[in-house]
Image: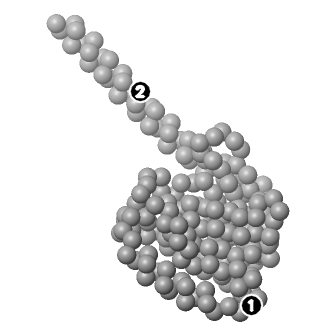
Amino acid sequence: MLIFLMYMFAIVGGILILSAVIIELKKLSTSSELSKLLNATSSFNIIFTKTFIPPNQSHLIALNEPYKKIAIGTSNPKTSKKAIAKLYSFDNIMGSEIVVNALTLSKVSKRQQNSKSTASSADINVLNNVDEEADVIEELTLKIYMNSNEIPVYSISFLPGLLPIQQSDNQYKEAYSQVQQLHAFFRSIVSE
């Protein structure tokens, strides 16, 4: 009986050690996704003054305001494909949009600026009131519209991995703050 217990504890101990190793490897793989994105943007030999990375680490947005450049890196953590980064000038940014639960909360584009449309700001206030009633958030996406034939729209999810998330959750508040900051930056670029 004692030998049986000894083997049973050895097997349980081995399983625990193996599960700890698997957890550590998963942590390393997420940091390697981040390093893939950073390596992809470092190939441009530009020092970026601001960097934004969504919680799921699928994209990287790097800004160089003095030289008016933006680098957008994309990586899919589910595949082993190499991370790709594209460098654009601020002139290539056509607009941006914040989407929460399939509702556009705010949108700005060069077309709106050129036509001097003010109806979009009224729509934003109505949608913000609707959004405040929502408790569960299933989507928080920043769409960046580019003047590019290769990738005309970047749809970047800023939600952490687990869905849905409560609107009162601190992770959501941080992600939403980051999205608002980027959208305000794109609004200033488009309005120039």
Name the residue rendered at 53%, 41% in the picture: 28
- Amino acid, disc 1: Ser
In terms of depth relative to the viewer, which is nearer, 48 or 163? 163
Q: Is 96 above or below relative to 122?
A: above
Name the residue rendered at 56%, 41% in the picture: 29
Image quarter hosting the N terminus: top left
Which of pointers 2 and 1 lies earlier in the amino acid sequence? 2
Image quarter hosting the C terminus: bottom right
- Report the coloring of the rendering: one colour
Dot 1: what SS? helix
Q: Marks 1 and 2: in contact by CB < 8 Å?
A: no
Quick one: label 2, few (<14), some, or many (20+) residues within 10 Å?
A: few
Numbered tag placed on residue 115 in the rendering: 1
Residue 191: image quadrant is: bottom right
- Total label count? 2
Quick one: label 1, few (<14), some, or many (20+) residues within 10 Å?
A: few
- Amino acid, disc 2: Leu
Q: Is 172 above or below relative to 133?
A: above
- Look at the image and tell me whether residue 67 can be seen: no
Q: Is 104 above or below relative to 45?
A: below
Dot 2: what SS? helix
Residue 46 image point, x, y percent = 77, 64
Residue 86: image quadrant is: bottom right
Q: Label 2 vs label 1: CA separation?
A: 62 Å
Residue 171 image point, x, y percent = 42, 63
Name the residue rendered at 76%, 89% in the picture: 114
In terms of depth relative to the viewer, which is nearer, 122 or 173? 122
Residue under pointer 2: 18
In terms of depth relative to the viewer, which is nearer, 57 or 117? 117
Residue 126 image point, x, y percent = 48, 84
Residue 157: image quadrant is: bottom right
